[in-house]
Image (tube, rainbow, N blue to C red):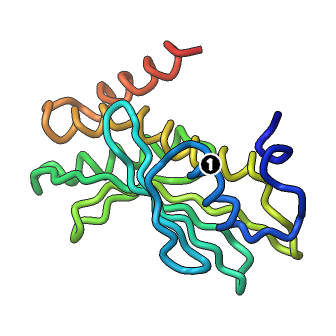
Amino acid sequence: MSLSEQFFQTDDLDPIDIVEHIAEYREWEFDRVDDDQIAMAVEGQWRTYSMTLAWSPRDETLRLICTFEMDPPKETWPQLYAALNAANDNVWMGAFTFWAEQRLMVFRYGLALSGGQSAAPEQIERMIATAVQSAERFYPAFQLVCWGNRSVENAMQVAMAEAYGHA
């Protein structure tokens, strides 16, 4: 039985209500910050990822921000930015960035629901899964660039090998 069939008998649910049901179903820690925002913790292999999903009715977009702490030495930032560019070239949905002031790695993703469209639970689960899978895939590469003294090209080979190794 799909999440849609199990939890939702109506099409007029707010996207954040759907996220809350998914978080309950998956037994993730979460906090309903506001009517249009939810924060949760999702456990990965490498880290626990902090996720915030926010619904903007004005521009009809569900935004996901997935963060994890990373405090690389300042002298490695140019290599980290090059690694972020390389990672972004290899993800189809979403993008990485580094928030230097907060010392956070960030994966961002937006789902446009223009024209009054509704998000399906499967779409939202896919957003969350994409964020975690992307962070898990590239986390070792970011670590190798910042602390392992590896070139971006060499570090990206680790991320690519990981992707091909779990088919």
Most foreground residue, 59 or 27:
27
Circle 1 packing at 10 Å, graded few (<14), some (14-19), many (20+), is: some
Q: Disc count in the image?
A: 1
Q: Position of residue 51 (x, y in %)?
A: 46, 58
Q: Dot 1 lies on which element?
A: loop
Q: Position of residue 11 (x, y in %)?
A: 89, 64
Against 109, residue 26 (above or below) is above
| Left or right side of 3 for 131 | left
Query: Which quadrant of the figure contains the N terminus?
Result: top right
Against 53, residue 96 (above or below) is above
Residue that appears at 21% across and 71% down: 101
Query: Which quadrant of the figure contains the C terminus?
Result: top right
Q: Specify the farthest residue to the bottom.
A: 58
| Left or right side of 117 for 50 | left
| Left or right side of 76 for 60 | right
Q: Quadrant of residue 56?
A: bottom right
Residue that appears at 51% across and 70% down: 32
Against 62, residue 49 (above or below) is above
The amino acid pointed to by label 1 is Met
Residue placed under numbered mark 1 in the picture: 93
Q: Position of residue 117 (x, y in %)?
A: 86, 68
Most foreground residue, 96 or 57:
57
Residue that appears at 22% across and 51% down: 70
Q: Position of residue 143 (x, y in %)?
A: 23, 37
Q: Quadrant of residue 87?
A: top left
Q: Quadrant of residue 120?
A: bottom right
Residue that appears at 31% across and 40% down: 47
Against 124, residue 43 (above or below) is above
| Left or right side of 120 for 90 | left
